[in-house]
Amino acid sequence: MVNRIVNAIAGIFILITLLLSIYVNQNWLWFTSFVGANLLQSSFTKWCLMNDILKKLGVSD
């Protein structure tokens, strides 16, 4: 369950920041890059900060 929520949050962040970069300012693409880099990092290290945050909020696996 946690992994599905993390994927949903990452997808939402990417879509929102892409829209913000089109309509507000292109610097929002830096946030999009940050989300992508964190997804890549978590694939190698098997650690994700959002997983830890969700577990502390009581979301179960």
Image (spheres, helix red, strand yellow):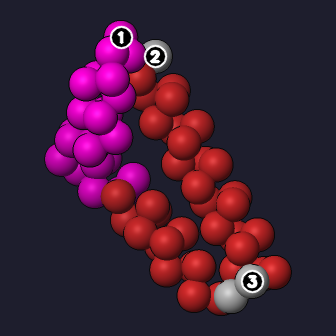
Which is in the foreground here, disc 3 or disc 2?
3
Which amino acid, mark 1?
Ser
The image quadrant of residue 2 is top left
Q: Nearer the viewer, mark 1 or mark 3?
A: 3
Q: Which residue is mark 2?
A: 1
Extent of the magenta region:
39-61
At 58% from the left and 55% from the top, the residue drawn is 13
Q: Secondary structure at mark 1?
A: loop
Is residue 45 or residue 52 the one in the foreground?
Answer: 52
Q: Mark 3 highlights which residue?
A: 24
Kindly give the residue lying farthest to the front in the view shown.
57
Q: Residue at x 21, y 41 (%)?
A: 47
Q: Which amino acid, mark 2?
A: Met
Q: Is residue 46 magenta?
A: yes
Give x and y (percent) for residue 51.
Answer: 31, 33
Q: Are marks 1 and 2 in contact (CB under 8 Å)?
A: yes
Identify the residue position indicated by label 1 in the image: 60
* Left or right: where 37 falls relative to 5: left
Cα–Cα span, label 1 and label 3: 37 Å
Are dots 3 and 2 in contact, CB under 8 Å?
A: no
Residue positioned 22% across, 39% down in the render? 46
> Residue 49: where, in percent of width, then height?
26, 44
Question: In the image, residue 7 lies at what x, y percent?
Answer: 52, 38
**Amino acid type, mark 3:** Val
Q: Name the N-terminal-most of marks 1 and 2.
A: 2
**Residue 19, above or below 54:** below
Looking at the figure, which quarter contains the C terminus? top left
Label placed on residue 6 = none
